[in-house]
Amino acid sequence: MVDHSVKLRWQNPLNFAAKIAANYRDESWFFLYSALNDKVPNSLSYIALFNEEKLICDDFIDAEKIIKNSDQRWFGYFSYEVGNDFEKLPETAKSFVNLPKIWLNKFAVILEFDHDKKSLNAFFSDKKKLEKALKWKEKESADQNLSIKNLGSNFSDQSYLEAISDI
């Protein structure tokens, strides 16, 4: 349960995320960046670390019960198909990507970046985990540029061009 909070010195969330990415390779973490346009008011970005609980299901009502009974923030996604739980939508082609309709995670450390106020708040349930995240922030990453490895596609160049042409 994230029940403690502390204000931290402002950091650019992209720089913070790059340092965490360079030092946090063993577990999943979450980064929501919402300040791509500085003219958007009330822009908040989040970094969430140290997964405490996962909620993976295909039933919105089950997910809603769990989320409503929690005072914490959950990060993840609701697929387009969740809309069918509320109204009859046109059927879509069966996706070749086999993912659950709902995938949410609850984390021990949540960093909230307020771009307008240039403030950074940390919400945490375990002070040692917060200290670990802040220690990573202080480390310089060996490579300041994030690199992408093993990038692939399920399209050949030709099939991609054909798909675009069909659209």
Image (cartoon, rainbow, N blue to C red):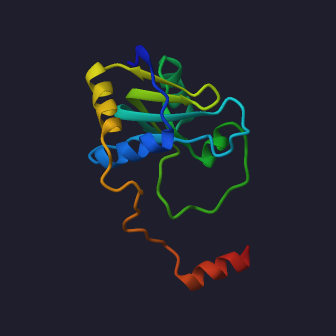
Q: Nearer the viewer, residue 121 or 26?
A: 121
How many circles with numbers are drawn on the protein?
A: 0
Residue 58 visible: no
Q: Position of residue 35 (x, y in %)?
A: 62, 41
Residue 145 point in image, percent of width and height: 42, 57
Residue at figure coordinates x 33%, y 36% from the top left: 138
The answer to whether residue 145 is left or right of residue 165 is: left
Q: Residue at x 73, y 44 (%)?
A: 88
Indicate left or right for 148 with 13 as reference.
Answer: left
Residue 4 against residue 27 in the figure, above or below: above
Q: Is residue 93 above or below residue 105?
A: below
Q: Farthest residue toward the bottom? A: 158
Quarter that holds the N terminus: top left
Image location of residue 72, percent across then percent down: 47, 21
45 vs 55, left or right, is right
Judging depth in this view, the residue of 91 and 2 nearest the camera is 2
Q: Quadrant of residue 28?
A: top left
Whether residue 81 is visible here, answered yes or no, is yes
Residue 49 x %, y %: 37, 34
- For the C terminus, the quadrant is bottom right
Q: At 72% across and 37% down in the image, what residue appears? A: 40
